[in-house]
Image (cartoon, grey):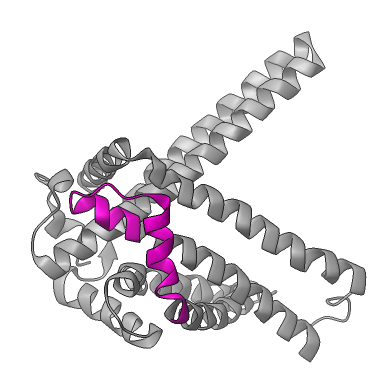
Amino acid sequence: MFEKFSRSWTLVKASASVLRSDKALMLFPLISGFATLLVLATFALPSFALGIFDNGLTAISAFWGFLFYFCQYTVIIFFNCALVGAAMIRLDGGDPTLADGFNAARSRFGAILGYAAIAATVGMLLGALKNRENNILVRLVGSGLGAMWTLATFLVVPILVSTDVGPIDALKSSVNLLKRTWGESAIGQVGIGMVFGLMTVVLVLVGVACTFLAAQASVALAVGVAIVFVAAVLLMGIYQAALSGVYSAALYRFVTQGEAPPAFQGVDMQHAFAAK
């Protein structure tokens, strides 16, 4: 476990070196976050006002739920493609702008819509399994399938950005690349999530403690301290999303070209995915 953590931390540092050279890459997940909140508000307000889910699962509520998933995934995938497109330019030694990233995503918008429809369908099915009441076995199966889906689709975005293929072919290519080269366990992806998960837990605990201490002096001070720590947690999430995008772009380049980008020289990329 320590060896896996150490390797993952090395990958995080290598990805971070790319972000240090181009901090503008973090704007993509930031804008994506605002866009997804807008989509959420757009669907949540009519849902409460019209009572769409008051009668449980109906044809109308199922369609509304799918439409929400589809719009959310479209936004998320679009901005991920923009991030990866810009990251690939940076990895090739270029100096990408926000426009370069958005142009890369717009050029693949049709494939993004198709993949968003697939992801929305899978997301609804997995959500139904994981939220199944009074059946822990089904919920565990749903969680396991969700983890497998995340792993299988890890390289879909770089494939969509780099090649002129449809969403189904991109899914097949992502699975084939994983099976052919590194096996089943995404050490790098899990490592980034684990590192930032631990950092977030520590930051939340420190924030709660500091807010409690500040409340002893002033309520206004406590509110200010709480806002600072909430902003810090959000910024950490944005940074993690940018790191994951850079990592997936570099990993895809290594798979397809057989060499690591300059920022990843010295990192054991062959063990980023290790067989169980």
Range of residues picked out in magenta: 85-110
Residue 58 visible (yes or no): no
**Residue 181: image location, x then y, percent:** 15, 71
Q: Quadrant of residue 231?
A: top right
Whether the magenta-drawn stretch holds residue 103 is answered as yes
Q: Image point 38% across, 42% down: which residue?
A: 195
Q: Image point 57% across, 30% down: which residue?
A: 205
The correct choice, above or below, for 245 with respect to 2 in the image is below
The correct choice, above or below, for 133 with respect to 206 in the image is below
**Residue 141: image location, x then y, percent:** 50, 77
Q: Quadrant of residue 207?
A: top right
Residue in front for this viewpoint, 63 or 201: 63
Query: In the rendered view of the protein, which quadrant contains the C terminus?
Result: bottom left
Q: Image point 44% across, 70% down: which residue?
A: 106
Q: Image point 70% across, 62% down: which residue?
A: 40
Whether the magenta-drawn stretch holds residue 40 is answered as no
